[in-house]
Image (cartoon, coloured by chain):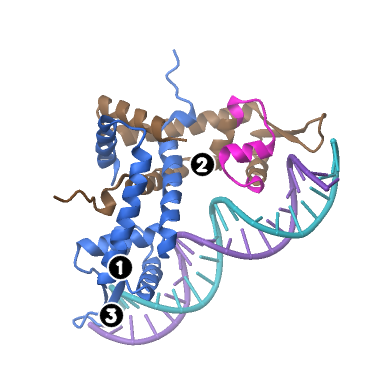
Chain colours: A blue, B brown, C purple, D cyan
Amino acid sequence: MDDEKALPATVAFRLGTLGSRVAERYAERLRPFGLKPKHAGLLAVLSRGPAASQQDLAGELRVAPSLVVSLADELERLGAVERVRDPHDRRRQVLTLTDGGRALLASCTTAAAHLDAELLAPLTPDQRRALDEALALLSP
Amino acid sequence: MDDEKALPATVAFRLGTLGSRVAERYAERLRPFGLKPKHAGLLAVLSRGPAASQQDLAGELRVAPSLVVSLADELERLGAVERVRDPHDRRRQVLTLTDGGRALLASCTTAAAHLDAELLAPLTPDQRRALDEALALLSP
DNA sequence: TATTGTTATACTCTATAACTATA
DNA sequence: TATAGTTATAGAGTATAACAATA
């Protein structure tokens, strides 16, 4: 008997390719807003905590600090975030979400929900719950 | 009641980020072989069909034809594939897997299987089956 | 003229490293 | 001297477009 799965049958391979295709489709939906998925990720992090330092944000998003700078630049240009210098440590730029930023995040969330609906259409409710559970266990 | 999921709770968002992290981890495992995931994908396609044209391969892998050229160049340099001109249409380069290429693919498959074992460790057998099923339904 | 493979070029994304200002 | 943010530079990965050979 042959226990060996072919490469395209492994979870790692399928998760990698599926993830890349889903990310691509999500990026398409965000394009009209002038955003890429990483912008949405940054908005989401800002929305749930009080503004951390940009270095902390970099750690949380698992990207280089210099990337946070350009993401924040672009979000600032869109009026979605504001940079305020921390008066206690003037080296720190504290990022805060504006009302426009919250609206933008809501749009990103709606776009993701629409994509979810399309993706999950072929799954039964039980299968959806199972997938949700698996993703919760697999996600870092 | 609030039906609206937060962005990081959507399937699209989690599948995108998880897929990218898994792909990164898989790429690490392939590095010692001098390969990237796309090389492994090409080897896998070649292993299960008789050699198609490079353009067909590009379509199957969803990449530009020029990328197939460089992937094939690198695999040829590693002795994993051979290019043979089709005598019936001398424009066509037929790619064939060598024994070395089959061995290399086996290594890629083993690496993916090891990664699978690590990824799936926190899941029960039922959860693994459910994930497998969902991936089958979601994958193109 | 159309098609296959190839080459040349450019673009996107992201990281590393150098720099500035505060501490 | 050390740290936050920024800027400059470079590299990976991939696509687009021009090109050569063959049909």
Instruction: Establish if B54 lies above or below C10.
Output: above
Whether residue A59 is visible here, answered yes or no, is no
Say which residue label 1 marks. A55
Q: Is residue A43 magenta?
A: no
Subunit that carries the residue with mark 1 = A
| Residue A111 vs residue D12, the one in the foreground | A111
Q: Is residue B55 left or right of residue D1?
A: right
- Image location of residue A100, percent across then percent down: 29, 70
Residue A3, image x, y percentages: 42, 19
Viewer-side residue, A11 vs B110: A11
Report helix, strand or loop for mark 2: helix
- Which residue is at 68% across, 38% downward? B54
- Contact (CB < 8 A) between labels 2 and 1? no
Residue A91 tag number: 3
Provide the residue designation for mark 2: B37
Q: Percent from the top left, x then y, of residue A82?
A: 29, 76
Q: Earlier in the sequence, mark 1 or mark 3?
A: 1
Q: Is residue B61 magenta?
A: yes
- Relative placement, left or right, of A9 versus C6 is left
Q: Amino acid at mark 1?
A: Gln
Q: Residues within 10 Å of mark 3 (few under 14, many from 20)?
A: few
Please tell me whether mark 3 sits on a helix, a strand or a loop.
loop
How far apart marks 2 and 1 lie (CA) works out to 31 Å
Quadrant housing residue B130: top left
Mark 3 and mark 2: Cα distance apart in space: 41 Å
Which amino acid, mark 3? Answer: Arg
Between A48 and B3, the one nearer to me in the picture: B3
Q: Amino acid at mark 2?
A: Pro
In magenta, the rendered stretch is B46-67
User: Left or right of A19: which side holds A87?
Assistant: left
The kind of secondary structure the magenta stretch mainly shows is helix
Q: Secondary structure at mark 1?
A: helix
